[in-house]
Amino acid sequence: MNIGQHPDLAWLVDYSAGTLTRGFGAVIGGHLELCAECRAQLRLADRLGSRLVDDAPALTPRLQPATIRAAAAASGAYTSRPLAAPENQTNLRDYVAAKLGFDWQALDWRSGTAGLRIARLQDRDDERIWLLHGDAGAAMPKHTHGGAELTLILHGAYRTKDQRYGVGDVDENDEAITHQPVVTADSDCVSLLVFEGRLKYTGTLGLAQRVLKF
Ligand SMILES: [Zn+2]
């Protein structure tokens, strides 16, 4: 498994502390199932967290991975030797179904824009949990949103302007970003999308949003 896109360390710290909500917890937990690097980061963060706070009281609450790595390197706790290949091959579709308590066969898929289907597992303003299925080559609607947004790729892959996201990768966005992922041409793509607030589509899709009630 070749994981290329990782969540910010702050998510791992919250995961470790048990403070993540249901949807965000499933995204981070799913990523950790496949990502030995983040599992190692999590262990380091646990070990080094209190020391960092003692040493640098002015640090912002969101510790950056580079800060953790620097502190770890200084303490001798971190080695840069290549990590062994992940021993397990967790099927992320099975993982999220168990974690979130749903049955893939019983989902209520609704058609969105061309080539895109959406199954909403939870639709509250504080946290929305959706599954997205995009046909090969399908473009997700261009959008921004009101708060944090995490996507975990469960099957296939998509690209944004400058990155590719495959199985196990986490795509993180916030209200400052307008983006439009496009499913790669070789396969369909299934992803778990968790976000706060509402998606706000831009351009002509603003009309579609009102009609289709995304
Ligand atoms: Zn990772």
Image (tube, rainbow, N blue to C red):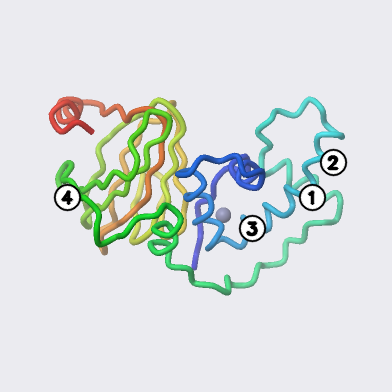
Q: If the picture is divided into quarters, which one holds ligand 1?
A: bottom right
Dots 2, 1 in contact, CB < 8 A? yes
Instruction: Say which residue appears at 19% left-offset and 29% top-offset.
Output: 209
Beta carbon at label 3 within 8 Å of ligand 1: yes
Does residue 204 appear left or right of residue 143 in this picture? left
Disc 4 to disc 1, how far (Cα)? 46 Å
Helix, strand or loop at label 4? It is loop
Disc 2 to disc 1, how far (Cα)? 8 Å
Where does the image place residue 164, in percent across and percent down from the top left? 40, 53
Few, some or many C-alpha atoms within 10 Å of disc 3 (few <14, some 14-19, many ≥20)? Answer: some
Q: Which residue is mark 2?
A: 51
Disc 3 to disc 2, how far (Cα)? 19 Å
Q: Which residue is mark 3?
A: 39
Disc 2 to disc 4, how far (Cα)? 50 Å
Instruction: Say which residue appears at 80% left-offset and 45% top-offset.
Output: 71
Instruction: Say which residue appears at 30% left-offset and 32% top-offset.
Output: 143
Q: Which residue is mark 1?
A: 47
Dots 1, 3 in contact, CB < 8 A? no
Mark before the other along the chain sequence, 4 or 3: 3
Q: Amino acid at mark 3?
A: Arg
Does residue 96 appear left or right of residue 210 in this picture? right
Q: Amino acid at mark 4?
A: Gly
Q: Amino acid at mark 2?
A: Arg
Disc 4 to disc 3, how far (Cα)? 35 Å
Q: Which residue is mark 4?
A: 115
Disc 1 to disc 3, how far (Cα)? 13 Å
Seen in the picture, residue 74 relative to 157 is either above or below; the reply is above
Instruction: Say which residue appears at 86% left-offset and 34% top-offset.
Output: 54
